[in-house]
Image: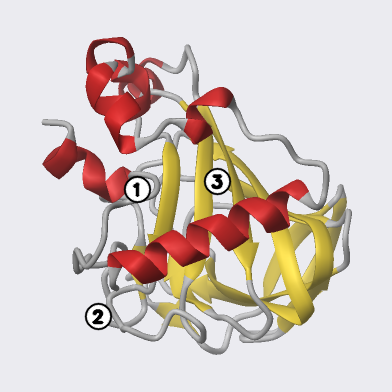
Amino acid sequence: MKRSRVNEILRSGEEFIGSFGYVLPPFANLTPADMKARRGEIDAIVLRRLGWDITDYGVGDFDNRGLFLFTARNGDANDLQQGRGMLYAEKIMISRKDQISPMHRHVIKAEDIINRGGGTLCIKLYASAPDGAIDDSAGIAVPTDGVIREFEAGEVLSLSPGESVTLMPGVWHEFWGEGSDVLIGEVSTVNDDLTDNIFAEPIDRFSEIEEDEEPYRLLVSDYDKWLS
């Protein structure tokens, strides 16, 4: 993705998030220069990969296959081994109308995916086979706001604003906005996007950035390069 396109997506995303009255934490406003100058103060932001995240999954077609994310808080994966501490994470995301976040599952992360406003959030669901692959024959049951709902393999769950679903590790899912763009909340186990995303096809979680202009904000995938 070109940096100019990323900058454009970030600015429009900020506006969309704000239109729902959702206020981002102060570090969302840090410029690249701010982050460099305050590097010694922001270890938790950098090491836990809090902040902005724009991906086209390396496909080069963000409008049709992509996702906008902001990680507001995230615990330490080491705490999971001890079973105590900050074991949770929170994101706010934008799924544009008909923009697909491709089929994937998580090994460790359980997550609540919440429609915070906008259109209908559509989620296609599959169970995992014993080897972890997609089981295209088995049904699946998922909790939706405390109510267990059953689906056939590959059936689509539709969530209206205010509704949510809990997806446990191993549940294959892809999602998109229907009708209009959707603001999505995610509350989950500690988030590790470097190792805990298993995709059904050979795609990348993060995008390569072509630097055609200065960054408006750093992405979490920029931290190693820009802040090391």
Name the residue type under label 3.
Ala
Q: Gap in Å between the C-alphas at discs 1 and 2?
A: 22 Å
Q: Would you identify the image quadrant in which residue 106 lies?
A: bottom left
Element at badge 2? Answer: loop
Vertical placement of residue 98 versus 95, above or below: below
Q: Which residue is mark 1?
A: 219
Q: Quadrant of the N terminus?
A: bottom left
Q: Which residue is mark 2?
A: 202
Residue 19 percent location from the top left of the image: 80, 52
Name the residue type under label 1.
Leu
Q: Residue at x 70, y 51 (%)?
A: 17
Specify the label residue 110 is tagged with.
Answer: 3
Closest to the camera, between mark 1 and mark 2, is: 1
Label 2 packing within 10 angstroms: few (<14), some (14-19), many (20+): few
Element at badge 3? Answer: loop
Q: Would you identify the image quadrant in which residue 56 lies?
A: bottom left
Closest to the camera, between mark 3 and mark 2, is: 2
Q: Residue at x 11, y 31 (%)?
A: 228
Q: Gap in Å between the C-alphas at discs 1 and 3?
A: 24 Å
| Whether label 1 touches label 3, CB < 8 Å | no
Whether residue 166 is visible to the viewer of this picture, yes or no, is no
- Earlier sequence position, callout 3 versus callout 2: 3
Vertical placement of residue 103 versus 214, above or below: below
Q: Residue at x 34, y 22 (%)?
A: 81
Closest to the camera, between mark 1 and mark 3, is: 1
